[in-house]
Image (tube, helix red, strand yellow):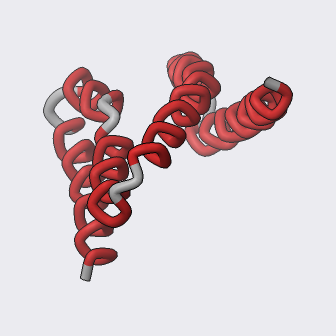
Amino acid sequence: MLFLVKTLIAALVIVAVSEVSKRSSALAAFLLALPIVSITAFIWIYVESKDKIKIADISQETFWYVIPTLPMLLLMSWMLRNDYNFYLSLFLCCVLTAGLFAITQYLLARA
């Protein structure tokens, strides 16, 4: 039952952003930028385990993995504004992000 509730919440967030984007791209971007998934995950982890240290660890690691996603957002915007194919843009942005994630993982492992 808990799994179903979690899935429903995640789906509602995606649908909400999609629907809001029809009216306001700024509001949709704002909703996407909110750490809704992180906050929801923190709540579920706490409810299920009461493990504050685990949440602290995930919170810190999430911070470091947000950074490699930022260039993807700028590249996606630039490519689409310069008339690149959407799927090519999405693919290249995913490749860039995966590469930046790998670099981040490497740097974190060394720290």
> What residue sits 47% from the left and 44% below the top?
53
Outermost residue toward the left?
Answer: 23
Which of the image's four quarters has the C terminus? top right
Closest to the observer, 30 or 51: 51
In the visual, does 43 lie left or right of 76? left
Q: Position of residue 81 (x, y in %)?
A: 51, 18
**Quarter location, residue 49:** bottom left
> What residue sits 22% from the left and 57% below the top?
12
Closest to the observer, 89 or 2: 2
Can you see residue 76? no
Closest to the observer, 85 or 104: 104
In the visual, does 85 lie left or right of 99? left
> What residue sits 20% from the left and 26% below the top?
27
Does residue 68 lie above or below 86 as drawn? above
Closest to the observer, 60 or 100: 60
Which of the image's four quarters has the N terminus? bottom left
> What residue sits 53% from the left and 39% below the top?
57
Can you see residue 8? yes
Q: How many marks?
A: 0
Q: Position of residue 17 (x, y in %)?
A: 25, 43
Does residue 97 lie above or below 42 as drawn? above
Does residue 26 lie above or below 61 as drawn? above
**Quarter location, residue 99:** top right
**Quarter location, residue 21:** top left
